[in-house]
Image (cartoon, rainbow, N blue to C red):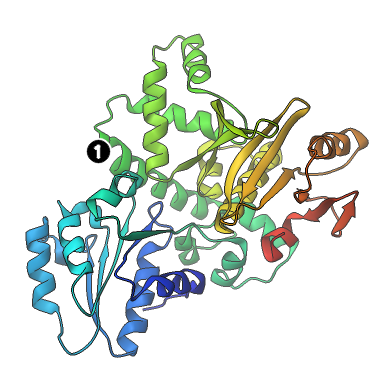
């Protein structure tokens, strides 16, 4: 089995082993959750542990449909002589699975790690269903650094261009990354599978054409503020009938299966979340590109902002859109220590008007948290302009802030 290690996720999992905690790997389909789980299984087998591996996408496990059948299979494969790692892939397809994993969590010498593609299964109510003892690890599509490793590339402007165009689905490693038709065909297949299995079938969606148009709208308006009401009004202006409630419900379905992520507004002066209007970003910008269908020279700023959003989430930040009287700040980012950074994203700082726009909003913030402008301006070197740091997109994706 050819597995490229994603050590950061393995280290995260290892940190929570031995603490009687159910570890949940979640994220969009085809971002590599299964391979992280398989990598862990191989490592533990090499260490002499007993691994009970159940893959619900493999027909060999079709007979396991509920927690009773799951218990029977696990019991038949447990070892009393060593640590047991119970690894279950796509567990949402097993009815009442929480009854099993909750029981095995407290069994001696048992570690439980599960994966699922639907956020609804791993939402706030899961704490009650699992007895409160679980830790969720969000698996994302490839970062730029992982993209270079997966496709055996060196860091360069051309490699960054390929990443911006193709995105980070690990499965693209099996295709010619420079063949745009192969890439887009695979991305479209993944997107259609997610839409069918995790939205249409799971939620019994009837108005599929509207769902598809909604995805197109979000792709076209990535990095722009909009509301469910504005989408509803837009659709009605086109002569179609819909409701704000339907828009809200469909947007929630898309966030629940990690196709898109919602970023709410944050009033920087008032230090509070604003409920009206949000931005939405795709969890893989390659899928966003194929849904939008436009050329990158037509929407490069949207894609770059999407790429920066994904990297910030990977870095562990909680991300909001900053709101000021003087304008908008693309990202207000807070880490687990409640430390904050402000970030503006631009394609090129090519003229004084653009520079004033991007720097002006940051200068209007009267606190001492770090402030950054990230761009693809040619030959840009990291520099500090009165406390605002300008760095290139490549440097940010390689070295962070």
Task: Using residue 280 as the reference point, say whether residue 44 is left or right of it.
Answer: left
Task: Using residue 94 as the reference point, say whether residue 121 is left or right of it.
Answer: right
Q: Is residue 76 visible?
A: yes
Compared to 294, does 24 lie above or below?
below
The residue at the point 53 percent across, 57 percent down is 168
The residue at the point 78 percent across, 27 percent down is 326
Counting from the top left corner in percent of width and height, residue 393 is at 73, 55
Where's the N terminus, which quadrant? bottom left
Where's the C terminus, which quadrant? bottom right
Compared to 372, does 107 lie above or below?
below
Residue 98 quadrant = bottom left
Q: Can residue 379 be seen in this view?
A: no
Compared to 83, does 172 lie above or below?
above
> Which residue position is annotated with label 1?
201
Task: Using residue 53 as the reference point, say whether residue 268 is left or right of it.
Answer: right
Task: Using residue 222 as the reference point, say whether residue 244 is left or right of it.
Answer: left
Number of numbered discs overlaid on the protein picture: 1
């Amino acid at each position: 089995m050819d597995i490229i290690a994603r050590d950061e996720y393995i280290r995260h999992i290892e940190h929570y082993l031995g603490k009687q905690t159910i570890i949940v790997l979640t994220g969009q389909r085809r971002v590599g959750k299964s391979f992280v789980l398989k990598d862990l299984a191989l490592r533990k087998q090499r260490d002499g542990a007993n691994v009970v591996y159940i893959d619900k996408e493999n027909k060999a496990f079709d007979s396991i449909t509920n927690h009773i059948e799951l218990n029977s299979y696990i019991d038949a494969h447990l070892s009393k002589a060593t640590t047991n790692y119970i690894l279950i892939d796509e567990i949402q397809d097993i009815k009442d699975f929480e009854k099993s994993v909750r029981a095995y969590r407290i069994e001696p010498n048992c570690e439980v790690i599960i994966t699922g593609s639907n956020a609804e299964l791993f939402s706030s109510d899961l704490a009650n269903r699992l007895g409160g003892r679980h830790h969720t690890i969000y698996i994302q599509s490839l970062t730029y650094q992982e993209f270079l490793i997966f496709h055996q590339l060196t860091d360069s402007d051309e490699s960054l261009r390929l990443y911006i165009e193709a995105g980070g689905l690990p499965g693209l490693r099996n295709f010619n990354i420079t063949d745009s038709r192969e890439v887009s065909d695979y991305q479209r297949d993944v997107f259609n599978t997610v839409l069918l299995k995790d939205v249409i079938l799971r939620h019994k969606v009837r108005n599929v054409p509207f769902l598809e148009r909604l995805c197109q709208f979000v792709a076209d308006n990535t990095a722009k503020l909009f509301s469910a009401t504005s989408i509803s009004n837009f659709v009605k202006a086109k002569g179609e009938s819909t409701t704000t409630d339907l828009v809200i419900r469909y947007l929630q379905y898309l966030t629940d299966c990690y196709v898109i992520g919602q970023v709410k507004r944050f009033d920087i002066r008032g230090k509070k979340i604003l409920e009206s209007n949000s931005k939405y970003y795709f969890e893989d910008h390659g899928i966003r590109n194929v849904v939008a269908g436009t050329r990158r020279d037509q929407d490069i700023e949207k894609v770059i902002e999407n790429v920066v959003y994904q990297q910030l989430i990977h870095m562990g930040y909680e991300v909001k859109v900053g709101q000021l009287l003087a304008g908008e700040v693309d990202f207000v980012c807070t880490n687990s220590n409640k430390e904050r950074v402000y970030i503006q994203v631009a394609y090129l700082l090519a003229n004084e008007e653009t520079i004033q726009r991007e720097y002006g909003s940051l200068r209007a913030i009267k606190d001492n948290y770090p402030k950054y402008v990230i761009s693809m301006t040619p030959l840009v070197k990291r520099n500090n302009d009165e406390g605002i740091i300008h760095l290139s997109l490549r440097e940010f994706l390689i070295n962070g802030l």
